[in-house]
Image (cartoon, rainbow, N blue to C red):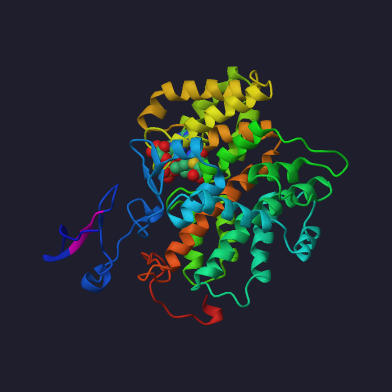
Amino acid sequence: MSEERKATLTIDGKTFDFPILKGVHGNDVIDIRTLGAKTGCFTYDAGFMSTASCQSSITFIDGEKGELLYCGYPIEQLADKCNFLEVAYLLRNRELPNADQKAKFEGTIRKHTLVHDQLTRFYNGFRRDAHPMAVIVGVVGALSAFYHHGMDYSNVEHRDICFQRIIAKLPTIIALAYRYNTGLPFMYPRNDLDYASNFMYMMFGVPSEEYKINPILSRALDIIFTLHADHEQNASTSTVRLAGSSEANPFACVASGISCLWGPAHGGANEACLNMLEEIGDVSRVGEYIKRAKDKNDSFKLMGFGHRIYKNFDPRSKLMGKVCADVLAELGLENNRLFKLAKALEKIALEDDYFVEKKLYPNVDFYSGIVQKALGIPTTMFTCVFALARTAGWLAQWEEMITDPDYKIGRPRQLYIGAARRNVPDIGKR
Ligand code: CMC
């Protein structure tokens, strides 16, 4: 990054210069790290609307163009030419694997899919009807109790093992949550299957009969994983970075990311979107819900619409729409009621002045729920699938942070607006 340009700030007649840093793509940033020391002022930027919290070489989004790059590669090409494990390798190593590296990495992941048998007992502590996101927050956090002693995350080999363990075990952990919830017997992973097929097998197989893999459906699920694998400094990734900045155990950090992802404004939108489509129920009621979404006095938002960064379209949504059509065709569900409803809703919203002016477009979650439902994944598990995929990005970002020589514990400042200093009155005078 060059530091040739400067931004000058004037406060009470005094001027202060700050370097302007230039990235490979995207907005320049004003380096204000010395602002507090030089001026005695902090910046105020609730929701990080204008703040770069780190430098990163992993993912880049051009919100105006609707472009998403992982390590420079367009998401469309990755979704077309690579599988999720190649993408996970890319995020961590910043380069795609060659044939040998791919075979070795996939082989290692296959060999780490089992979880410690003791971990399976955790599930019994949960209510059967517990939300699976709550269950996986607990179980993934509990991995830190299994893998903590003797781990030195300044050692690249230890970070390697951590990455392999979590990528390999997450499908097993999520499938176990589903099996516990439904009362079905736990299915051990099958190391002869590819990553997505193994997840489908652990979710839907039964010990009493052979489970037939449908390669088209497995491939669709694998693309869903790729589309969700990373997304710059979004809320959950920033949560993982902040938690990890205190040198906390990475499994515990991933659990914090899962907690953040759960919210309906973030990864929980896929579940919320499907629930919304069910509630709307019929194309004839779309107008009523569009009206509600535009009403300032109504808290209702069109789930699966809008994004902080994308202001033209979300490229993941386009790909997801195509995956959705392919999966429905494979299953003979082209006339699926919710898909038709989603199409109608999308068309009407995209032509509506409110959505056009505010640049609100379908995001990745708009179609992902329909695809997942068609695959047989229950609505409450949708965000778990998102978490499974995003774990690759979270750990790549965590590692990037802790290996950055400039890294410091995350510690934002604040604008205090509470009571001014005062003395505690005696109890009788309060
Ligand atoms: N329906 C109706 N109005 C909306 C919507 C929506 N889905 N999204 C934003 N707006 C309005 C919002 O009310 C605001 O209006 P005004 O300017 O009059 O106050 C304006 O558009 C700007 O919205 P914002 O909430 O200030 O924008 P943001 O960047 O803070 O929020 C968002 C982005 C994704 C949280 C928001 O668009 C939203 O809540 N969408 C629905 C939930 C959703 O689909 N989330 C998934 C995001 S993509 C998956 C992921 O990466 O997690």
Task: Determine whether 47 is above or below 15 in the image.
Answer: above
Q: Residue furthest front?
A: 100
Task: Determine whether 23 is above or below 333 in the image.
Answer: below
Task: Where is residue 63? Give x, y as percent.
Answer: 36, 40
Q: Quadrant of residue 313?
A: top left
Q: Is residue 135 left or right of residue 101?
A: right
Quadrant (top left, top right, bottom left, bottom right) of the N terminus? bottom left
Magenta region includes residue 162 = no
Q: Quadrant of residue 111?
A: bottom right
Residue 292 in view, yes or no = yes
From the viewer's side, name the closer residue of 46 and 84: 84
Task: Where is residue 125? Give x, y as percent.
Answer: 79, 61
Q: Residue furthest left?
A: 13
Q: Is residue 124 left or right of residue 401?
A: right
Task: Where is residue 385? Give x, y as percent.
Answer: 62, 45
Task: Determine whether 359 is above or below 154 in the image.
Answer: above
Q: Residue at x 61, y 78 (%)?
A: 150
From the viewer's side, name the closer residue of 403 and 348: 403
Residue 363 in view, yes or no = no
Q: Residue at x 47, y 63 (%)?
A: 399
From the viewer's side, name the closer residue of 244 and 105: 105
Q: How many marks?
A: 0
The range drawn in magenta is 18-22
Q: Quadrant of residue 21?
A: bottom left
Q: Residue furthest bottom?
A: 426
Ligand 1 rendered quadrant: top left
Task: Give the dominant element type of the magenta stretch: helix, strand or loop.
Answer: strand
